[in-house]
Image (tube, grey):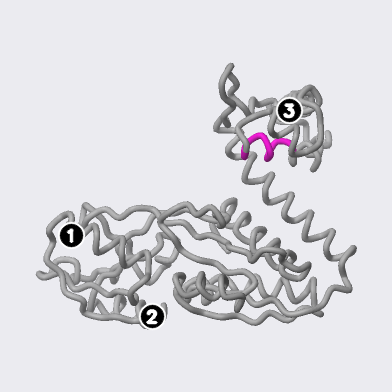
Amino acid sequence: MNAPLNHPLPLLELDVLRTFVAIADTGSFTLAANAVFRTPSAVSMQIKKLEENLGRQVFLRDARSVSLTKDGEVLLGYARRLLALNREAMAKFIMPEIAGVVRLGSPDDYGERILPAVLKRFAQSHPSIAVDVTIDQSVNLKRRLADRELDLTLITTCRNLEDAEILLTEPVVWAGAKGGTAHLREPLPVSLWEEGCVWRANALEALGKEGRDYRVAYMSAHTAGQRAAITADLAVAPMAKSFIGDDLVALGTKDGLPELSNYNLALVMAANASAPVRAAADHIRATFEGFRQTGTF
């Protein structure tokens, strides 16, 4: 039932949201209690109060496990975003004096599409921190991080990595020109990134399993070059679904192309990261929490 318009809605308490996220991440009230330094009974009381305020159940509980309800999954996105924004806001006031250089890595596609907004917001809140951006393939970015040439980096991967924080999981689809016919040609003309790209590996594996004849009609390490080949109807290419935009169309099994799998975008940070690096990481997290809620960056 909707609250009366003249009646203020209850506020979500950040301390309760932190507990809620800890339970969702650990799958256990006991482990979450240890993580937030509370007793299990106190944690249970927090979640009971949260569910009463929302009028919804956020967890399904049985003797062996704890899982999110559908409402809980929706709340989790909001909770992560609110906590990330809280860290960002507090950093603005309690760490305004921090200065230094953050060496950030990113794949080309995300460097072109996402980083401008992230860097703009970061410069506004931390004007004394310079960000040195390196654009490269994920495999090279991981090596640069291991060699201490980077402080943190975004990478694309088809696997869950122990040292990586997953920011986004979404499908890879075939991108084609609007009204194009490239996907109907034999052999299939394909535009690919260079070796080491997870989208490339995904596409070639799918084509091989289906036994579809193809030829590499265009190859580029840069997003702009790939999009040019697709919009000119020279080829189709594997691409993240959210990257399709108004100038391209997503193709799939209905168009005679093999289904592709999901991929992960992950954030990897060097050990013993400095305050400027941690602040930059928080900005990146907040950006992707916003995307999960709104569908736009």
Q: Residue at x 33, y 74 (%)?
A: 195
- The quadrant in which residue 296 appears is bottom right
Residue 178 picture location, percent across and down: 29, 69
Q: Which residue is mark 1?
A: 208
CA distance separating discs 1 and 3:
49 Å
As shown in the figure, which amino acid type bears the numbered disc 3? Ile
Element class at badge 1: helix
Element class at badge 2: loop
Placement of 20 over or under 275, stated as above or below = above
Residue range highlighted in magenta:
19-25
CA distance separating discs 3 and 2:
48 Å
Q: Residue at x 30, y 55 (%)?
A: 260
Q: Residue at x 81, y 26 (%)?
A: 42
Placement of 26 over or under 112, stated as above or below = above
Q: Which residue is mark 2?
A: 221
- The quadrant in which residue 70 appears is top right
Q: Quadrant of the N terminus?
A: top right
**Label of residue 137 in the image:** none
Left or right, 157 with reference to 287: left
Left or right, 79 with reference to 8: left
